[in-house]
Amino acid sequence: MRIPSLIATLLGVSASHAFLLTGTIHVEGTRVPLPGAAVSIAGRPEIPSSLTDAAGAFALSDQAAGVSKPVAPRFKAVFLGRSLKIDGIGAGDSRLDILSASGRIVATLQGARTGAETVEFRLPRNLQGVSILRLRQGDAFAVWTLVSLQGGAGAMHAGASLLASRGLAAIVDTLVVTKPGMQDLRYPLPEGAGDRVTTLAADLAIPSVSRGRMRFIPEGRFLMGDSLVAEAMPRIHRSVRSFWMDTVVATRADFRASGIASFGADSLPAEGNWMKAVRYCNARSRAEGLPEAYELTADSANWAVAPEAVGYRLPTEAEWEYAARAGTTTGWFWGEDTTAPTMARYAFTYSTAAGNQQPVGLLGANGFGLRDMAGNSWEWTEDRFGPYARDDMQPIPQYLSYGYHRVMRGGAWMSSALEVRSGYRKHDLPLNPAYIGVRCVRTAFPDTARPWRIYPVQGRARRIPGGSFLMGDASLDTARPVSVRRVRNLWADTVHVSGAEWSAVTGFVHYGDSSKPADINWYKAVRYCNARSLRDGLDPVYDLVGDSTLWWSDTTRNGWRLPTEAEWEYLARGGSSSAWWWGSDTSWDVVGSRAWWSGNSFGNSRRDGLRLPNPFGLYDMVGNYWHWTDDFFALYTEDGSRPKPLLVDARYHRVMRGGAWFSSAEQLRSGYRRHEMGLASGYVGFRCVRNAD
């Protein structure tokens, strides 16, 4: 019972003042539409008076959705002062349940009959956000959406709506805001968000979701480029994933706090070359315990760029322009007016900056709540300079040498009006002493894109709910037949165990780069599992029997262990049933954004966490390093069973899953299997799991 989307459609005649929420619910197996709840914004409600109460504090859906067995009566609800009058109610008891967006019953009201088929219900005064009104009379239902208007600013539920009380169930996972003449804005909504409410921004009617100094920028598609700028042609539609972006550029105080030299007043934009900008991004990542997005190579001349890194990074050109436009299609995000009064409200330029830089954040924000996107300080982007590609995506090289010019955007205090257009481009060498600032972004992953976590986290492990899935791959000889398998609840490491972690727990030296996954044999991997279990006060899973080559694993114990093959594939798929967890697209940019493989590794492995996670929030489940599993190799059976000896010695080949940095896209399929003797190492890592309650 899942609803694909919740659509907020701006009203045509009063598009700048209100929008509609629509969706679908299920009432005891029957689909029922939610016909829309009008929400006023900007303090100027233009909703029919019958849909709002006398004080303008509530807005109601414009019609009721009725379901009955077998005939659906039509209930009509209108406001009467602070009360809700419902017509069409025949004889017999009726009640009005008020449910929160998460399915919790807030109140059950008994109405006063004021006519033969009319009942009046007095609404409580403490309702907030979005509520569901459910009228029940016998087997008949009626459902309305009720929205609390907060001081005319408007509000909506910003989370997954789950209504599971008394057979009423619904789930909403996406908000889409549309407005004539603007791009659609999509906001993925997380599960388990409860009753959280997000205030709507009055200028564009989009959720204003912030975390610290950053603002959430929803995924979307826009027309990139500028017909007045030769270097910004050809114009082409580009797609952008969700990300977080600083509301203002970094200040000189920010640089100094990160250990980077910067002179001048604290509130002025920090200036430096491209290398200093990426060092600032890495410093912010380290300060928050996040993996760094930039990796300095041994020759100190090249930087490995990870656009999907968990940590802070520079925006790509497409991300920067998409954020600057904030849904607009005009030359400047405020329109086409470049008169002095208008420019003075939004941009510090040659004509408005009084001949010098100004403190950040003083002028008006664009529709995404970002300030200084035009003027005051140029801003570095991730991309090297070059002509625009004619396809949708413009891949970024994994290594960029000092010789590549980098693109800067936005204009500065000495710029002309032309240079602060949303599509204007300029470029410079990354080592040149520069007058260019930095505005960091972070890729919006499921656990970082929103203020709520989808799955509980414990240390470096995430709790993954168990379930059934189709295991195997009909196109692979060793991965068929496909059969249904059941996996229990698990705690699973989000990344491979690194060499540093293996050494810290076992006390043995790991040779090689300790920041990368520990490339060790199967026996060393299970020794680590036992040592980690003892450290955490858990029962070790593996018992040494006789000589050092015989091991027995008991997966019923609560300690850390290697995943079984079925558990690994369940975790890798992340709920998907396609050949690869992201679908069937094996183009260079799609695979490269999700895995280190032969197409982008340049003959070397990487540390984990620099590619996109799968839907379970697990990184590098495919690519970079193979994974050891707990199982020895055997062909699948029709019923999915596979006998397992209690004693397993070195003669048994162990199953490896997931592929490595040198693997083809075919080897990254969720069902792909490989096997070697347990003594193999050098390109095989592991991650631990343990049983969850």
Image (cartoon, rainbow, N blue to C red):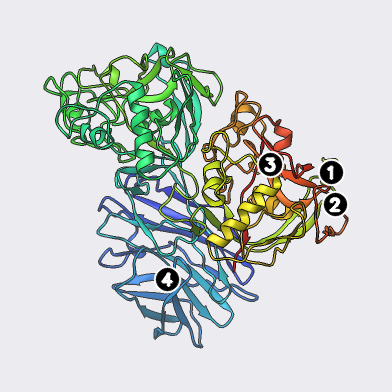
Residue placed at 18% from the left, 26% from the top? 263
Q: Residue furthest left?
A: 354
Q: Residues within 10 Å of mark 3 (few under 14, many from 20)?
A: many
Q: If you read the primary sequence from the N terminus, does the residue marked by circle 1 or circle 3 appear first?
A: 1
Q: Are marks 2 and 1 in contact (CB under 8 Å)?
A: yes
Location of the N terminus (image quadrant) = bottom right
Q: Could you say where residue 573 lies in the image, as x and y percent from the top left?
A: 66, 48
Sequence-wise, the earlier of marks 3 and 4 is 4
Split into 4 quadrants, where in the image is the C terminus?
bottom right
Residue carrying label 1:
478
310 vs 319: above or below: below
User: Which disc is residue 77 wearing?
Assistant: 4
Separation of marks 2 and 4 at Cα, in angstroms:
60 Å
Residue picked out by circle 3: 658
Mark 4 burial class by Cα count in 10 Å: few <14, some 14-19, many 20+: many
In the picture of the structure, the residue carrying the numbered disc 2 is 636
Q: Could you classify mark 2 by the number of other residues whose Cα lies within 10 Å: few (under 14), some (14-19), or many (20 or more)?
A: some
**Secondary structure under badge 2?**
loop
Circle 3 SS class = loop
- Per the model, the C-alpha gap separating discs 4 and 1 is 62 Å
Between the residue at mark 2 and the residue at mark 3, the CA separation in whole angstroms equals 18 Å
Q: Earlier in the sequence, mark 2 or mark 1?
A: 1
C-alpha gap between disc 3 and disc 4: 57 Å
> Quick one: which residue is furthest to the bottom in this view?
92
Residue 623 appears left or right of 102: right
